[in-house]
Amino acid sequence: MVAARLAAAEAALGCQTSIVSYRFPDAQSNVETDLRTIPNISQVRLDYLPPLTRQERFLALDARKRLEPLLGEADAIHLHGVWDPIIYAAASVAGRLGKGYALTVHGMLDPWSMAQKGWKKKIALALGYRGMLDRAAFLHFLNSDEQALVKDLHLKSKSEVVPNGIFMEELDPLPAEGTFRASRPWLGDKPMVLFLSRLHYKKGLDYLADAFAVVAGKFPEAQLVVAGPDAGAKESFESQIRQLKIEPRVHLIGPIYGPEKLAALVDCDCFCLPSRQEGFSLAVTEALACRAPVVISTNCHFPEVREAGAGVVTELDAREIGEGINSILGNSELALRMGEAGRELVTSRFTWPKVGGRMIEAYRRHIAGAH
């Protein structure tokens, strides 16, 4: 939903914006429900392509035909992602129409991501995807770390660094303190560490388990709440916490959304995301906005956390992560200062109206005809 929120922010600033995507019948009702929560989304035109067929998934031939009249109306085109055939198709259509396009890489070109099924990506680059990247009016990176990490690809296009954001209207007013704990009586007033993301290898759950074992040794009452859908790492994580003998204090509660998610962020004593790779984490941003002190890895590429004093940024080392959590759980005054600093950081720099304004200026600088 990043593209939808950016489009809504740009629309509120006076742009005529539209979003083109495939229709996904199995998830369409959920998509539309989520869209309704976005401020100003009613000002954005939504164009849906027919559902994917097996052939379309790999070749995007139907998309090419349908995109031409839609992209022909645009002064600026913004593509989100790298490896989906529809992105390549849209870039090809834009080039044929003489239209400039921005392309948000969403962390897909950094070394960790490139190493995942790396041979397929090397072939794709050789068969035309490098040209697609080189022809972009600019590549959009979410942070300066992400920008620096792609230098070895020697891409020819210009680049811009603009973060993601959040709409404070979707968060405020925050749930009352104690709401989440009241719904989970086993928590009581025990120290609570919260992980909130997909249960995926990339998210560093193996580091989190070892780190919490460090925390458990110092804080006998501390509890780890792991919230998010399983994306392949749940079984190995459960096995690891059994081996570490911390299973009774680790609670996998599945995915949580909306007010329940915010209530968990409000009530946690520390939010931890020890990822192997992030472009720009909305989970971290939401945690900061909810005044949760955070412990994150350097691979989250969110140096502003350290600069603002809003949390602890560590290397991917379980003991270092655990000690970072301990420093917060052991000092309530520090935790309070971090929480306030995090909220100020988000409101001053990472809201969608501010992000949308910066992106519009980037279009003006790089894309001819972008008004």
Image (cartoon, rainbow, N blue to C red):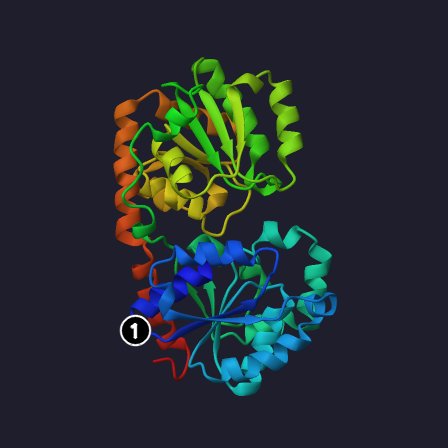
17 lies above or below 334: below
Q: Nearer the viewer, residue 22 or 217?
A: 22
Residue 38 image-quadrant placement? bottom left
- In terms of depth relative to the viewer, which is nearer, 101 or 63? 63
Q: Residue furthest bottom?
A: 97
Name above or below for residue 366 compared with residue 232. Answer: below
Tell me which amino acid carries mark 1. Answer: Gly
> In screen coordinates, is 51 left or right of 137?
right
Residue 146 position, x and y percent, is 48, 55
Decide if residue 359 is in sight here.
Answer: no
Q: Is residue 310 left or right of residue 246?
A: left
Q: Please tell me which residue is depicted at 34% across the width and 63% down the height of the picture.
A: 40
Q: Is residue 286 above or below residue 55?
A: above
Which residue corresponds to the image point at 57% horizontal and 55% vertical from the top-left? 27
Q: Nearer the viewer, residue 137 or 265?
A: 265
- Which element is circle 1 on? loop
Give the x, y percent position of residue 194.
45, 31
Q: Which residue is mark 1?
A: 14
Q: Is residue 352 left or right of residue 261?
A: left
Residue drawn at point x = 45 percent, y = 42 percent: 257
- Residue 145: image x %, image y %? 46, 52
Left or right of residue 358: residue 321? right
Q: Which residue is outermost to the front? A: 29
Visible residue check, residue 353: yes
Residue lying at 43% horizontally and 55% vertically, measured from the top left: 143
Q: Quadrant of the C terminus?
A: bottom left
Q: Nearer the viewer, residue 327 or 5?
A: 5
Q: Position of residue 315 (x, y in %)?
A: 49, 36
Count residues near mark 1 (Cα–Cα under 10 Å), then give few for <14, some for 14-19, many for 20+: few
Report the label total: 1
